[in-house]
Image (cartoon, rainbow, N blue to C red):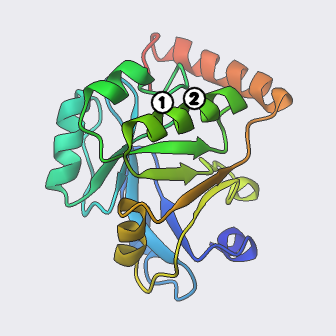
């Protein structure tokens, strides 16, 4: 939260992997609006759930994950679609009724972000951007610029109404090497399964 305030963010979505629990700790902080969210590990890759009111079970098909997000009152966005070990891939994004696409991700490389942005433009769905921060120093590496909002619901409505413009840094080559080593090692120990 301190990093979000330092970076001048007025609203954040904390999307921990497969867990909604952090929202209860952050929602009433009095400084930054917090959209309840989760980064759900579907059987085919990550799906971002914004505005949900409960946990979403991991490991389901993309369609069942989207349906569960909708049942929990949220919207489903395709997360970093071109990241090979955790992204859904273009075919899954095109083949399912996502509410939007993550068009910028601070931990994706420049090519992946360009392709995600092009795909989002082509599909004509709302866009989000996420820093995918696993440490405080990366919070705000990707963000959306939108009109002021007085609640997280207003902020999410701005995104869904197309009033959000995405901005994102890209993963540097040195970070890519470290990230690839870490991700491939974890992938091997998971039995060659996506997160």
- Of badges 1 and 2, the one in the foreground is 2
Note whether residue 134 is visible: yes
Image point 26% across, 47% down: which residue? 56
Does residue 59 sit above or below 31 in this rendering?
Answer: above
Give the residue displayed 47% in from the left and 10% down from the top: 192
| Image quadrant where residue 96 sits | top left
Seen in the picture, residue 94 relative to 113 is either above or below; the reply is above
Picture coordinates of residue 149, whole percent (x, y): 46, 81
Does residue 21 appear anywhere in the picture?
A: no
Q: Position of residue 23 (x, y in %)?
A: 41, 67
Residue in front for this viewpoint, 150 or 86 = 150
Give the image location of residue 3, x and y in percent.
71, 69
User: Helix, strand, or loop for circle 1?
Assistant: loop
Circle on res. 129:
none
Dividing the image into 4 quarters, which one contains the N terminus? bottom right
Rate crowding at label 1 as few (under 14), some (14 to 19) or many (20 or more) other CA atoms within 10 Å: many
Q: Position of residue 84 (x, y in %)?
A: 53, 19
Q: Alpha carbon of mark 1 to alpha carbon of mark 2: how far?
A: 9 Å
Location of residue 186 (image quadrant): top right
Q: Which mark is residue 81?
A: 1
In the rendered image, which residue does mark 2 sit on?
Answer: 115
Q: Quadrant of residue 64?
A: top left
**Tags 1 and 2 in contact by the CB under 8 Å rule?**
yes
Q: In this view, does 65 lie above or below 146?
A: above
Q: How crowded is mark 2: few (under 14 residues within 10 Å), some or many (20 or more)?
A: some
Please tell me whether mark 2 sits on a helix, a strand or a loop: helix
């Amino acid at each position: 939260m301190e990093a979000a305030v330092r970076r001048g963010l007025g609203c954040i979505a904390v999307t921990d992997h497969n867990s909604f629990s952090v929202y209860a700790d952050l929602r009433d902080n009095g400084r930054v609006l917090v959209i309840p969210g989760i980064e759900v590990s579907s059987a085919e890759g990550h799906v971002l759930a914004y505005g949900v009111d409960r946990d979403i079970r991991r490991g389901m098909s993309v369609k069942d994950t989207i349906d569960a997000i909708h049942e929990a009152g949220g919207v489903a966005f395709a997360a970093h679609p071109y990241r090979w070990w955790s992204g859904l891939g273009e075919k899954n994004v095109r083949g399912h009724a996502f509410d939007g696409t993550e068009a910028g991700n601070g931990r994706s490389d420049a090519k992946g972000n360009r392709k995600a942005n092009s795909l989002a433009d082509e599909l004509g769905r709302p866009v989000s951007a996420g820093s995918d921060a696993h440490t405080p120093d990366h919070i705000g590496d990707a963000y959306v610029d939108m009109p002021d909002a007085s609640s997280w619901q207003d902020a999410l409505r701005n995104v869904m109404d197309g009033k959000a413009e995405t901005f994102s840094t890209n993963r540097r080559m040195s970070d890519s090497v470290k990230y690839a080593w870490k991700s491939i090692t974890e992938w091997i120990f998971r039995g060659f399964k996506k997160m």
